[in-house]
Amino acid sequence: MPIVLLSVAIALVLCVGGAATILLIGKNAVDDAEAAAARVTIAQPVTLGGLPLVDDPRFSAVTEEMESSLAAYPGASSSFGALYGSPTGQNMVAALATKATITDPEKEVAESFRVFGQSATVSGLADAATGELGGVAKCGTSSTSGIDLAICGWADEGSVGMIMWFFKTAADVRADFPALRAEIESKS
């Protein structure tokens, strides 16, 4: 099932990307990022973009794997992985995010997409709007088993995450990304 394979790959991207970034940072950068990260809240929404949380037991292993992988992210807290929409209606969105101290959001997003690209090609990767939350975001299009997959990933001083739309391209979702991210992340 493409959803299972892709979700596990995305969770792995976040873990590998985070570990690489932590190794490249200095103490002052960490102190600054920790102060900014303290203002970030990550919460799993009940709905995302109006789509209901998928509670189908066939997908519980996918979300459990995403959550356990994110829990291993360096400094992670408030992590979640969830599927939204209708598996039969070809209207599905996967979201995963974690609160963590990120000292270089640009490198974090680049590393996440670089590692993801080792499993599946992402085309048309370009900067995306971040809305009021700031940080860095990129969107691109991939495919698995002939199914288009739009992927938008972000990082800021206190979070890293991805939202994936099945049966869509980046051009279809780029304008929607900031609003969906704001349903997951808030800053005080």
Image: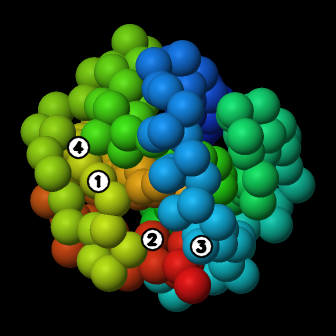
The kind of secondary structure element at disc 2 is: helix
Q: Quadrant of the C terminus?
A: bottom right
Q: Can you tell which of label 2 and label 3 is closer to the viewer?
A: 3
Which residue corresponds to mark 3?
39
Callout in the foreground (4, 1): 1
- Tell me the kind of residue under disc 4: Gly
> Residue 133 location in percent, x, y?
38, 74
Which-is-in-front pick, marks 3 and 1?
A: 3
| Separation (CA) of disc 2 from disc 1 | 10 Å
**Residue type indicated by callout 1:** Ala
Q: CA distance from mark 2 to mark 4?
A: 16 Å
Instruction: Please report whichever mark, 2 or 1, sits nearer to the chain's N-terminal start.
Output: 1
Q: Which mark is residue 181?
A: 2
Q: Is residue 145 above or below residue 162?
A: above
Above or below for 76 versus 86 = above
Circle on res. 137 = 1
Neighbour class for label 3 at 10 Å: few (<14), some, many (≥20)?
few
Which residue occupies 33% across, 32% down? 107
- Answer yes or no: is residue 77 visible: yes
| Tag 2 and tag 1, C-beta contact below 8 Å | yes
Question: How much space separates mark 4 and mark 3, taking CA atoms?
Answer: 28 Å
Mark 2 vs mark 3, CA separation in Å: 16 Å
**Which mark is first along the chain, 1 or 3?**
3
Q: Which residue is mark 4?
A: 140
Name the residue: 33% across, 59% down.
135
